[in-house]
Amino acid sequence: MGSVQAQIVQDPTHWSYDLKKKNDSTFDLVFKLKLKEHWHIWSVNPGGDGLQEPPQFTFDNNASVKKIGTIKESGKMISGPMEGIDGTVHYFLNQVEYSQTVQVKTNTTISGTHRYQVCDESMCLPPKNKKFSFEISGIAGSKAVEDTVQTAIEQSVDTSKKIVASVPSHTDTPSNIESNKTENGSKNSSTSDDDTQHGLLWLFFMALGGGLAAVITPCVYSMIPITVSFFTKRSKTRAEGIKNATWYSLSIILIFTILGVLISVLFGANALNNLSTNWIANLFFFIIFIIFGVSFLGAFEITLPSSWTSKTDSKAGIGSFSGIFFMALTLVIVSFSCTGPIVGPLLVLAGRGGVVGPMLGMFGFSVGLALPFALFAVFPGLLNKMATSGGWLNQVKVVLGFLELMLAMKFLSNADLAQGWRLLDREVFIAIWIVLSFLLGLYLLGRLKLSHDDASPKNIYGQEYVSIFKLFLAIVCFSFSVYLVPGMWGAPLNGMSQFIPPMGTQDYVVSNGGDGHPDTQNRALENSEVAPQKYVKDMKIYEPPIVVQSGLVTYFDYEEALHAAKVLKKPVMLDFTGINCVNCRKMESQVWSQPEVMKRLKNDFIIASLYCDYDKIDLPKDKQFFSKELNSQVVTLGDWNEHLQASKFNSNSQPFYFYVDENGNKLVDNGYSYDPNVQKFVDHLDKVKATFSKHLK
């Protein structure tokens, strides 16, 4: 699009509402969305890098209404990579339906607000809040209020700006699906059953790997020879022993799969994913993982109540197949302290597979866990070749302990980002991971001993030695530590970008000046009277990586930017952007990052990044007002930025760049929207600079 005449983009969504009766007291509240061509809306599980805003449905308190399960979405979901976003994203084109099951005691009105954001190939619109209302009048019928008919809903004052978008876990499920691209760069996306199968297949193999990894934990590994020997001794023939061991393995699979089914039924398709993005849940996971990690390092043992094991163990002698089933249940319970830390993250991951995810995840995990029991029953001679239980199993637990502590930091980071505590900024997070990885490497080399460790093996000369396998693991740990070190000074660490906190939380970044040289002008600006002050603490976290890495100084307040322009005698580039704006990130990574562009931005312009979807800062009461352009109340900083764009520049989409002088007067008629043509953007900046030079004269 490039340099274009700005215009207000009408909302490309059409919402309608329906009420489906299931029985006398249970209803499905249905939200139907139709989108104009080329526009898309994110899934309730958008995936990506955690900055995409999913649809949210908030219900007003009503004692007569009980929600059953969570919001379900149905439609042709597209999953795949999207330029400018890390990881796989999930979204809908054309149409999608959302439904919420409720149980109602009496005739009532169910009301609330739903929030959504839509984008196309070149722009995103700020998130919108829309009210809804369902009238339930007993078993005789019901009425859904459509947004196209109920104009009061369209024009109502928005009172739900306190919704805080949750931060999704960065541990999103990768996918092999790729969106097709046309020659002009627009997406020609499609999906099929194969897309879903690919994602679920990947989930199955991840779960299978988790089950195989659980086999070498002390709780499970030590049970293999004992259990298999028991089958072979109590069975009259080898065939009977194989049959019993096979039933034992199938029982393990059945128990875990039933667990997956129960999770799907009780929590629904998206509950686990929603839980993984909730700050309280993430804080809970952090505490649990710390406890498991410290336990694995030898501080204490985590065991379930002995009565649980005794009750199941006492049933092991009942009948043939029923007794074997209870033996399998005993293994599942006894091994919890070792398998729990593996099953926990797996369930979070499986929750992204909808209803099928937990079932398939638990099935894959149990297959991996049960496989050795069946294998050794078929080939009992292999038991003699198994490494005996001993110190190496303790070392496995210690390695898992270090990994648990590293994962715990990720959960704490999710909660920290959601609440804005700034306890675990990027460099603090990286420093902790460097130390943990380095200590793990030392442990593998035998240079770090814990109180419950056995003596290291010695060679014929009485010297301690390290196995080749542990040596290579130590090399991986030390290499990972070295890889992380540059991140302490602002290196992007693209390979870990989904796990570490965003660049905006970094307190110190070695600037490259955009063209490879430090920019003294911007360094001086940081300490001058016109250094950005307002909203910096709250907004700095959302600055794009290229802005942080280049040392570009940006303002987050319009008036503050105008004041800086007066002092420094530079034009202002108003960057109307959004935290959840995909195309904004594309422009920054593809265009701003180019040396010829960054040089101009740093030397010739004052940059004001005005986030139109930021809801966490309320304006003072006397500064709040009703915007005719937005047809809504201006309550938050994001509302004000959106109103400024709409009222002054007749535009409401992001990204959009407009240019004004120190008094806020427009320098050129046209703004610049998403267009990754670097030379076109350079020419546009030069035109604005030339116009401003004439203005100074």
Image (tube, helix red, strand yellow):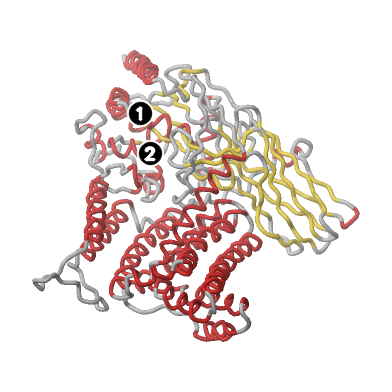
Which residue lies most toward the right here? 140
Q: Is there a contact, CB below 8 Å, between mark 1 and mark 2?
A: yes
Look at the image and tell me whether residue 78 can be seen.
yes
Quadrant of the image containing the C terminus: top left
Q: Residue at x 41, y 75 (%)?
A: 225
Look at the image and tell me whether residue 692 can be seen.
no
455 in relation to 184, above or below = below
Q: Residue at x 25, y 48 (%)?
A: 483
Q: Which residue is mark 2?
A: 544
617 in relation to 9, above or below = below
- Which mark, residue 459? none
Q: Nearer the viewer, residue 44 or 568?
A: 44
Q: Nearer the viewer, residue 208 or 593?
A: 208
409 in relation to 464, above or below = above
Q: Position of residue 657 (x, y in %)?
A: 44, 26
Residue type at mark 1: give it: Trp
Residue type at mark 2: give it: Pro
Q: Secondary structure at mark 1?
A: helix
Q: Position of residue 35 (x, y in %)?
A: 66, 32
Q: Position of residue 432 (x, y in %)?
A: 28, 59
Q: Position of residue 255 (x, y in %)?
A: 58, 68
Q: Quadrant of residue 86?
A: top left
Q: Quadrant of residue 434?
A: bottom left
Which residue lies most toward the left here? 461
- Crowd rating for badge 2 (residues with CA inside 10 Å; few <14, some 14–19, many 20+): some
- Tell which circle, 1 or 2, labels the residue nearer the N-terminal end: 2
Q: Image check: 619 left or right of 408?
A: right
Q: Residue at x 65, y 56 (%)?
A: 70
Q: CA distance from mark 1 to mark 2?
A: 10 Å
- Which mark, residue 592? 1
Q: Nearer the viewer, residue 404 or 524?
A: 404
